[in-house]
Amino acid sequence: MVEVALRSVEDRDLDTLYELMRDPESVRMAAFVARDPDDREAFDRHMAKLRNSPDLIVRAVTGDGRFLGTIGRFFVEGDAEITYWIDRAVWGQGIASRALALFLEMVEVRPLHARAASDNLGSLRVLEKAGFSVIGTEVAYAAARGGEIEETVLRLDL
């Protein structure tokens, strides 16, 4: 079993994260992504903002010491939300579930919200296994899909 841990995002992680966030299947499943995943300057600006904002938390997810993605908390209209991006090469191995469990121990804000494309069953399973409950759906524009899709909204109260 892979030992999952969280740590601060380091400069050395950024090239790998950029490549992970350009993987076509990962982008399609995430759906709500940057307008142009291939725009490295926009990626660098976004990551600098995330890493330097006192209101945001972003952590690297590692497996046996190897960088596998990120997990974070941000605010939308006053609501705390989480997001994560895990290397597609390790999907289905419990990495996201373990990273989320570690992150929830660290982040005490509740309620905590999450969103996923309604057809992203893997991500929805990860969230529900962690105790998130579906509170509704919305239709929103998904850049990766080039149109509006259904998004499931979840909340963790405990």
Image (cartoon, rainbow, N blue to C red):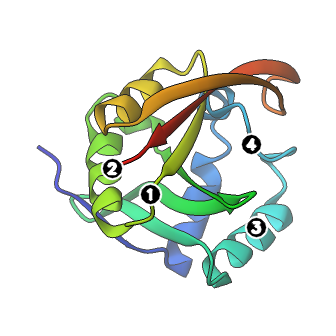
- Front in this rendered view, residue 83 or 5: 83
- Front in this rendered view, residue 2 or 79: 79
Q: Could you say which disc has been placed on residue 15 in the image?
A: none
Q: Position of residue 14 (x, y in %)?
A: 59, 68
The answer to whether the residues at label 4 and label 3 have Cβ atoms under 8 Å apart is no
- Secondary structure beneath dot 4 equals loop
N-terminal of the pair, mark 1 or mark 3, is 3
Rounded to the nearest whole Å, what is the CA distance between mark 3 and mark 2? 30 Å
- Front in this rendered view, residue 77 or 130: 77
N-terminal of the pair, mark 4 or mark 1, is 4
N-terminal of the pair, mark 4 or mark 2, is 4
Q: Position of residue 84 (x, y in %)?
A: 51, 49
Q: Position of residue 113 (x, y in %)?
A: 54, 46
Name the residue carrying label 3.
Answer: 46
User: Which residue type carries mark 1?
Assistant: Arg
Name the residue carrying label 2.
Answer: 158
N-terminal of the pair, mark 2 or mark 1, is 1
- Secondary structure beneath dot 1 equals loop
Look at the picture and state if 94 lies above or below 57: above
Name the residue carrying label 4.
Answer: 33
- Numbered disc in front, either 3 or 2: 2
Q: Going by the image, does 144 lie left or right of 84?
A: right
